[in-house]
Image (spheres, rainbow, N blue to C red):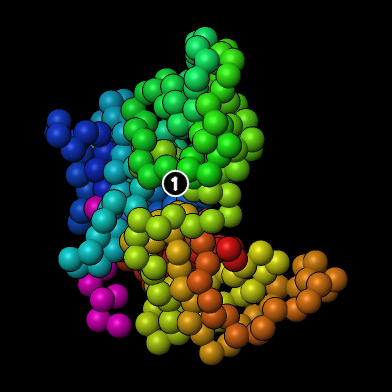
Amino acid sequence: MAEFFNREARLIVGSPDAGGLEIVDLRISFNVELSLVGYPNMANIQIYNLNKTSRNTIKEEFTKIFLYAGYEGNAPLIFSGNIINVTHEKQGPDWITTLFCGDALKSINDSTINKTLPPGQTTESIFDELVGQMEGVTKGVTEGLKDCLTKKRSLLRGIVLAGNVKDWLDKLSQNCGFDYSINNDVIETTIKDKPLNDEPTLEIRQDNGMIGSPELTEVGVKVKSLLLPQMKLGRKVEIKSISAKINIGNLIFRKIPPTVGVGVYRADKIQHIGDTRSNDWFTNIQARNF
């Protein structure tokens, strides 16, 4: 359990390379929600008792934020994105600044394309054209493109790409059987319902960070742990537990799974909740069988 001591959090508002506002010693609370469903990842971040100059600076100048959290020696970036809205509220003796943020939100919602591509296109070449229209977004791990038929067999006819980029990404992912997400301005794809294999499997045990018991669901498992900043979407997580809860749902019509929450799953949703001045410092994971 030693790796879970000495909590740390750091927030940078603005560019780290151009004098962005760095917040370390003030109270910071956060709720970060990451999802492998093609929607923008979101974060709600509260900062306590910023001085007036800093409050005005955030409101008027800065749009990009970088949130680092974890433990001494292991506090990686858990969220980067753009401020959607900011509020400053006086509550008792405290000034609370709340940042509502989305990861690549503008790129996802506003990017458009109008291109005619010649015959011979593959899934990856179409994907690259779409991603190329998303300002600030780069391509990361793309295992999800490997098994698509249009990658193995290039298109015999040309294709016209016109309209919203996200709509085209959704069509491409549905037709070709992959999931995608944008994490810290990096777009990744994984084969439908399969995990990525670029990271070691993260192990969660009841004697090493797990809180309570796993909850079995129709498609996999839900598990809560002390904050796991290294957990990434689409990666494998191994649950080792001596007991589990059952989320009945539609399971009443199916064979009930074993009540011991063990196995290897794919992380589909991750929620990081933390507060540098309270007991909140944990990660919720929803993972599926594969």
Query: Which residue lies under the disc numbered 1?
Result: 143
Magenta span has 123? no
Q: Where is residue 75 in the image (x, y as percent from the top left)?
A: 24, 60
Secondary structure found at label 1: helix
Q: Where is residue 202 in the image (x, y as percent from the top left)?
A: 39, 69
Residue visible at 54% across and 56% down?
A: 194
Residue 249, above or below 166: below
Q: Quadrant of the C terminus?
A: bottom right
Residue visible at 49% across and 57% down?
A: 195
Residue 65: quadrant of the picture: top left
**Amino acid found under the numbered disc labelled 1:** Glu
Q: Quadrant of the N terminus?
A: bottom left
Residue nearer the viewer, 26 or 206: 206
Residue 31: quadrant of the picture: bottom left
Please say whether residue 101 is visible from this viewpoint. no
Neighbour tally class for label 1: few under 14, some 14-19, many 20 plus, Cα within 10 Å: some
Q: In this view, does 69 lie to the left or right of 38?
A: left
Q: Which segment did they paint magenta? A: 1-10
Q: Is residue 105 left or right of residue 9?
A: right
Q: Which residue lies furthest to the right in this view?
A: 253
Residue visible at 53% across and 49% down?
A: 191
